Amino acid sequence: MSFRSSIKCLFILTIIFGTACRKGQQEQAVVFSNDFEEGNLQHIAGGIITTFNNTRVMGRYNNGGFGLQLDNLPGHDLVEVSFDLYIHDSWDGNDADPDGPDKWTLEVEGVNFINTTFSNKECPYTCFPQSYPLNYLNSNQQPKTGALPMELPGACHWADRPRGTTLYKIVKRIRHSSPSFTMRSFDELYQSNTGEQLCDESWSVDNLVVKTINLD
Ligand SMILES: [Ca+2]
Ligand SMILES: [Ca+2]
Ligand SMILES: [Ca+2]
């Protein structure tokens, strides 16, 4: 085979296999990304910026939360929401009244996609179970189940504890095709033994990213 024929053959193979590789791939677009370092709260309702562990985060919240509204999205079949969720201080998980259950919710277009509880209570002392990674009240998981294996100090009440905060990576793909997108995240926390509720139990968010995804 001549050099010219070899090049032609390579060109044809590239077209054939290149097309095959593209088939089945997903086309993704990042439509929102915020690490909160600039204090930018565009598209966000209820945003608060604080510093935790040398990074700026959105929060902290106690019986509160935030909303995100995006418009003019490109055509898509799915939306992927991802963020770091910090659970700070003395969350009691599935524990009953008066100090629990300590619930956290992620809602998209008015539908609950995560409605769960978290527990930061260390076993074997006050080992209250949590529902995450399942929804409340489908399960009794060990505290911190599904968390990243990191030691992070508490934000306030447990600031002197090396494991006072727990980090979860939340990644959720949702069928969605509307050009506008609305999500909310909020908590329902109970702490009967203190007047400083935000210090006792809170949560915050970092590295919030929304992607649209086209399926073939
Ligand atoms: Ca940050
Ligand atoms: Ca508590
Ligand atoms: Ca509580």
Image: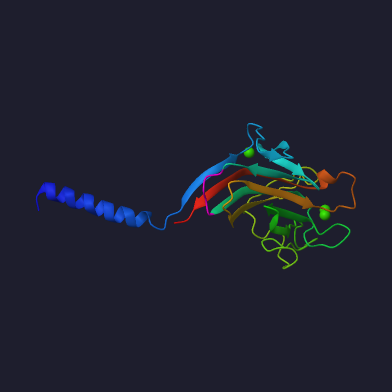
The residue nearer to you, when weighing 213 against 206, is 213
The residue nearer to you, when weighing 199 against 149, is 199
Q: Position of residue 188 (x, y in %)?
A: 80, 53
Q: Which residues are magenta?
A: 73-77
In the displayed image of the protein, which residue is found farthest to the left? 2
Q: Position of residue 116 (x, y in %)?
A: 72, 59
Q: Position of residue 16 (x, y in %)?
A: 27, 55
In the displayed image of the protein, which residue is found farthest to the top? 38
Residue appearing at x 37%, y 54% in the figure: 22
Residue appearing at x 85%, y 46% in the figure: 197
Q: Is residue 159 left or right of residue 2?
A: right
Residue appearing at x 75%, y 50% in the figure: 186
Asked whether residue 164 is in view, the answer is no
Q: Quadrant of ligand 1?
A: top right
Quadrant for residue 176, please give it.
bottom right
Residue appearing at x 66%, y 32% in the figure: 39
